Amino acid sequence: MAEIIYVTTLGSDLEATGAVTDLDILWTDTGPVLYATCQVTGTVSAYDVSGGTPAQVDSQALPGDINQLGGLDVTLVEFGDTTQMVTLAGSTTGLPAYALGTDGAINGQTDHDASGLAGPVWASASITLATGTYFFAATEAAGRLGTYQTHADGSMTLVQNPVPPTGKPADIAAMVTVMDGAAGYLVLASATQDVLQCYRVNNDGSLRQEDSIGVADGLGINSPAVMATVTLDGQPFVIAGAAGSSSLSVVSIDEGRMTATDHVVDSLDTRFQGASALAATVVDGRAFVVAAGGDDGLTLMSLLPTGRLVVLDTIADTLEMGLDAVDCLALAGQNGVLDIFVGSGTEGGVTQLSYALGTAVTLVGTAGNDVLTGGAGDDILVGGQGADQLRGGDGADVFVFDMGDGALDKVMDFQAGTDTLDLSGWTMLRSADQIGFTVLSNGIQLTYAEETLQVFSADGTSLSEADIRAAMTPGSLIHTPVTSTTAEGLVLTGTDGNDTLQGGAGDDFLQGLGGGDALIGGAGIDTAVYSESTGQLVVDLNKPEDNKGVAIGDTYDSIENLIGSDGRDIFKGNTEDNFISGGNNKDSLIGRKGDDRLDGGADDDKLEGGLGADTLIGGEGNDRVMYKRAVDPLIADLANPERNTGEAAGDVYVDMEEMVGGRSDDFIFGDDASNKLWGREGNDEVYGRGGNDTIYGSHGEDWLDGGAGNDILTGGGHHDAFAFGAGHDQITDFRPGIETIHLDAEALWAGTLSTSQVVSQFATVTETGVLLSFSAGASLLIEGMTTTDGLAGDLYFL
């Protein structure tokens, strides 16, 4: 099986000084660049670690007045297309930051002095959403957890400055961000309250708490100090290391809900006592976690898709390495190996280790009777519930078993001296002495509590107890039971009568069926379900007296979410943050106030988020964004929603093809798909961009610009203006002498022409109207127009 090996020690300038307090990786076009921060010298050194012998790229001395309380750290933050290295120990003028070049070079200094940034930052994180990049900092100077938006010009501005939810800035020991689909989340670790807290990052950078997990929920953490994140098969995980309990906790994030999937404690066989350093990454679909502490070494683990940790290898310090009192870690997967970079709080330089990745696969069983077969690499095979058969194939394989249902499990091709048995998931197993062994002619049988495991040798010969003891390290990770962060949700179904359904403390699903039902959610995020309904259905959480169909007579208390049917549903939320799913068919979903998530599902749906930063998901079909109730002017942009203003501010669009404006003077923009766009009331400007668009100005004096593609433009009966510069467009309701056409002269013809010359050279009368056919290959049809007389007076040039 692959082992961690020592490669080299980087940084002759750091070797004599020690106290490497931070390591960060920037991926450039040519590979990774490592930044090592040394508290003693007050410098940051950059190394090209993209392959071969590492080479120093640059070095930067930090300002002399910098505050080094709690260690000197930096973080890498996006500012538009540029990455800045922001120092977290503030100087008198703010947080010094340096733009990083595409080769990793450290460039000119900028001092970020946005409100509260002129002091040490206890913890920080950043996240990039569709609306921009946000930097979160717990600062002593402001006494708050600040949210700042970064800008392409290299500056940052304060967005929100709330009191830290954990009490004070120093109480936030660590923070990380994760993406769950299009949604961003900030996770904080409280050192004094022994809790992890999850906050939704709204599209404007503001925060909304979603969940928390800690000691009170059965998670055995004491003084969480470090965190790392990975996303595996679309599922985000947070790994938290706690110094006081020498533990690692794995928590999954699902729409803001936190669920503990594993909790392990350091043992004599692992090296993360005190859990002072943690790093994680995903390489070719495999998640790796490295943890270290005060016991002179580190442990490399694999994180399975189920959220379970499996030890791959542990390495102890030697004279040539610097693994004493590890303070920081960084990982880079490249060239078939996982590079591990280690900074010690007492020894100089950066130790580089590597672990060969090979062609391993990870296979995880289900609740049934599974047959799992590995390949030629060092595979990990995990048995689930049921009677499982695991065959590793060639390579040094790891066979993993948890406490199951007592069914007979089998390893079919065990290679003594090569393969490994991980039985650390067998509850309370601390020694092989607790296992019963029965030698078989072609293997050996293990029994523990209600578990029976038969291990058959690859060559058909018997296996000894000594073979198994050598292959297993039951104390390598001490797994302890984990408790879900939320109370178990209830699924309640009524009858065709008048039912009262009362939810519990969890996230409940209440389905009343027929009759006038009282649906009472209680605590948690609760959902009213109408998936069994047929025909048209109207459900209004705010005004249930307007309900129609099977929902007539239903009332709601503490219901936040709605799930629709296969009929034509009209669903309306309330002032809470609602999730509304329309299901199949043509649905109309209205969120009202709050940061809502509307999912139209299949067919052509209409989604109206209302006030708040809403996520509008069209799904299959041609789906329409609605702002028809918006009173104030707005900007709504399907391609660049970060530009949105007014009621559209903060909204995010997924699979939306159409858009309707509001009651004032709006700016409506399509994308490169074929859109349908309406301006509605007011004097609107509507831009189609790419695609074959259909644009309606409706009421008001509107400006319609189809952009590229073959577009159909309809003004709507007022004094409208039409812009044209590409494609083959049609104007359906042009009124000569009243409305105007604006042509992009540079794009449509060469040279300088008057409007009369444009008409004489390019205009012809056809059966359907006047056609302007330009030398550039573009054409504009003015439908219903029977003569070119007077047309020159209606033409203008852009």
Image: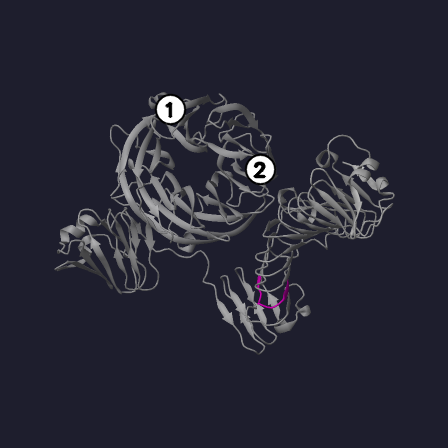
Q: Is residue 46 visible?
A: yes
Question: Which numbered disc covers residue 105?
Answer: none
Across and down, in percent, residue 663 comes to 76, 52
320 on left or right of 216: left
Question: Which numbered disc covers residue 148?
Answer: 2
* Residue type, mark 1 in image: Ala
Question: Colour mode?
Answer: one colour
Using the rendered view, name the quadrant where residue 191 is placed. top left
Across and down, in percent, residue 666 comes to 74, 46
483 on left or right of 596: left
478 on left or right of 703: left
Q: Secondary structure at mark 1?
A: strand
Q: Is residue 565 above or below residue 207?
A: below
Give the extent of the magenta segment.
Answer: 561-571
Q: Is residue 512 above or below residue 336?
A: below
Question: Which numbered disc covers residue 55?
Answer: 1
Foreground of the two, 399 or 164: 399
Q: Is residue 553 visible?
A: no
Residue reaching furthest to the bottom: 497
Q: Quadrant of the N terminus?
A: top left
Q: Residues within 10 Å of mark 2 (few under 14, many from 20)?
A: many
